[in-house]
Amino acid sequence: MNKPLRKAVLPVAGLGTRFLPATKATAKEMLPVVDKPLIQYAIEEARAAGIEQFCMVTGRGKTALVEHFDIAFELEATLRQRNRVEALEALKGTQVEPGSMVTVRQQVPLGLGHAIWCARTFIGDDPFAVLLPDDLVLSHTPCLKQLADAYRETGGNVVAVVEVPREHTNRYGILKTGKDDGRLVEVLGLVEKPAPEDAPSNLSIIGRYVLMPEVIGHLAKMERGAGNEVQLTDGMAKLIGHQPFHGLRYEGTRFDCGDKVGYLEAQIAFALARPDLADAVRGFLHKYMK
Ligand code: G1P
């Protein structure tokens, strides 16, 4: 029997330099897509996959992320007084079970692998999910739920993967692939951000993972990889051959909200998926397409 998947780690310590000046005094994970911050999409997706315990790996200037999931007593009291039912309803997704969300601080930006290692006490001996809030997925079944189902099926590590143009392999973790049924693909190797000519495939990892706790022991060695950072990909690569490791071609569309164009595209796609906004948005888009 696989251990149930109940924990998620959300690395949110990044500086957000690509979104300055917007991110000068606020966390990039607080940037909204339509009317909801990126971090809330990630938490809601995790919840939909059965996650009950959350650990945000934060850094300096990220207090708004913690505030966002607290009760805003004055605001809620005022809204109740004014009978603003819809506004109160909009706050529902920000409510978490008391004690279910913790934060740890990544004091120095040594890479994604180091960020995950910072959550080692929270992880303990349990399998855990990782969600990178920059990656937003629009899908019928929440992306992490798809991974959680695949974890139950395969009993090991599962990462969400998608084919990218070969010239983009240097932006992602890339798979060396084994058996492939078109949905689940066996992982034989992992390389972080290889040059197109060195990439073992064009199948890339997106920011959704289900990992076994043994990865922490490998990350603890603090070996530097691509960009002189401690890479999660390198830690995961050490598990291959010892534990099941699969890539899942998820159903859905990923938007890289760490990138300006990706972020703008997400705004449009998510607005068009909203019954209350779709017509109005489609209406004005025509104007700009001329
Ligand atoms: C990170 C990971 C990379 C993964 C990517 C997905 O890279 O290191 O393996 O493909 O997220 O978004 P980053 O975007 O932090 O450079």
Image (tube, grey):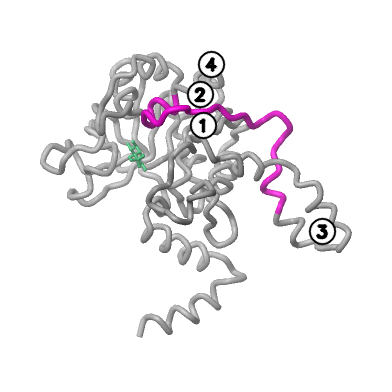
Q: Which residues are magenta?
A: 91-116
Residue located 52% across and 46% down the image: 27
Residue found at the very far left of the displayed protein: 197
> How many numbered callouts?
4
Q: Which mark is residue 79?
A: 3
Tell me, yes or no, whether the two marked residues, 1 and 2, touch with CB atoms within 8 Å.
yes
| Badge nearest the viewer, 3 or 4 | 3
Tell me the residue that label 4 is attached to: 124
Q: Is residue 143 rendered to the left or right of residue 89?
A: left
Q: Which of the marked residues, 1 or 3, is nearer the chain's N terminus?
A: 1
Label 2 CB sits under 8 Å from any ligand 1 atom: no
Looking at marks 3 and 4 on the same chain, the residue that comes earlier in the sequence is marked by 3
Point out the tag, 2 or 4, that comes first from the N-terminus.
2
Give the labeled residue for mark 1: 57
Instruction: Please give the name of the residue rendered at 85% of the width and 52% of the height, measured from the top-left corner.
Output: 77
Packing grade of label 2 (10 A; few <14, some 14-19, many >=20) is: many
Q: Nearer the viewer, mark 4 or mark 1?
A: 1
As drawn, the residue found furthest toward the right would be 81
Q: Is mark 1 within 8 Å of ligand 1?
A: no
The correct choice, above or below, for 177 with respect to 164 in the image is above
Looking at the rendered structure, the secondary structure element under dot 4 is loop
Choose the circle earlier in sequence order: 1 or 2: 1
